[in-house]
Image (cartoon, grey):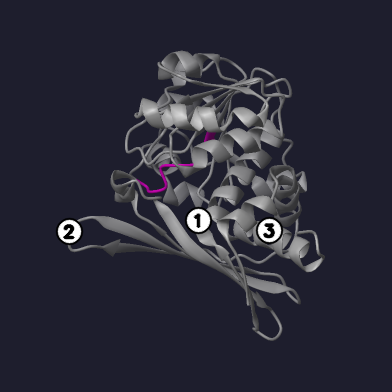
Amino acid sequence: MKHFTADDVQRLSPYHDIVDALAEAYASDLIAPQRHHHTISNIDGTDATLLLMPAWRAGGAIGIKIVTICPDNAEQSMPSVDGIYFWQDAKTGKALASFDGAALTARRTAGASALATRYLARKDAHTHLVVGTGALASQMIRAHATQRPVKKTFVWGRSKAKAEAIANAAQEVGVVVAVADDLESAARQADIISCATLSAEPLILGRWLKPGTHIDLVGAFKPEMRESDDELVKRATIFCDSKETAPNECGDLALPLQQGVIPPDAIVGDLRDLAAGTHPGRISDDEITLYKSVGGAIQDYATAALIWGKFTTGMK
């Protein structure tokens, strides 16, 4: 059985290919049941999250991800997300490959955000703000730069040292990457804002946003967590990766829906609608758009299939 390391995953899944693969997958008949979501309580009082995420294509392959999210790992300089992805023949069940789960998750998450940007950001969007200094931050810089003519990216985090490290490492992307000392000032300048944090309180406020901004929210994965405030969701045209799961699983949507801040029909489309063309995406240059990601097995499957296809055809 072939194992794809983190380096293999990165090398065989350039972002322009991931975004195209995701667009095809969301417009296809790929089957992805709702994921299993379990809270794991530890004896020290901390909680971890276990996710089991299957997907398959009839006559093709079965993919399943086993992943954990441990927010307290950051205090020990360890990744918050870890796991493994398995790839099997759908007809025989034969195990074909495994993939580094953390690397696959980071690549497909940033790729899905970039896919949303393809449909939702202004064509001339050139200033990008990345909020957060975890494993996704550098991936967001690279992914979004493949979809829009980004000239400058700001990185903001609670740790300036971590933000500086990410900015320095991303210089080869071909855009100017700088640390933002003031979050509000950077948000007011940005055409695209990507948040990838485990924040329990809003970080980006609606009153900061200029017309035409696209907001990309990929952190805050629990119903009690938020990266945006009520004013932001009220001002925005809202999209997500899955209308079946996102409104219930993440506080950025669940809380304003429960509290009547936005109506039940506020979410106008998801990645299936955008990829299939049943929703046109952004309709004006002044529109503020919001994409909320909770992740999904379709994203894992599409990225793994891309890597497996390159491997089996000798494109190594």
Taking the image as shown, residue 131 lies to the left or right of residue 153, namely left
Q: Residue 16 lies in what quarter of the image? A: top right
Measured Cα–Cα span from mark 1 to mark 3: 15 Å
The residue range painted magenta reads 216-223
Q: Position of residue 88 (x, y in %)?
A: 64, 76
Residue 286 image offset from top left, x and y in percent: 65, 17
Q: Find the distance from the CA under tag 2 to the CA under tag 3.
A: 37 Å
Residue 144 among those drawn in magenta: no
Q: Secondary structure at mark 3?
A: helix
Report the Cα–Cα distance between label 1 and label 2. 24 Å
Q: Nearer the viewer, residue 77 or 152?
A: 77
Decide which of 211, 64 is in the foreground and name it.
Answer: 64
Instruction: Look at 77% across and 61% down and name the residue there.
Output: 310
Quadrant of the rendered structure where residue 308 is?
A: bottom right
Amino acid identity at mark 2: Asp
Q: Which residue is mark 1?
A: 102
Label 3 neighbourhood size at 10 Å, few (<14), some (14-19), many (20+)? many
* Between discs 1 and 2, the one toward the N terminus: 2
Q: Secondary structure at mark 1?
A: helix
Q: Amino acid at mark 3?
A: Ala
Comparing marks 2 and 3, which lies closer to the viewer? 2
Instruction: Specify whether 167 is left or right of 255.
Output: right
Residue 98 visible here: yes
Q: Which residue is mark 2?
A: 44
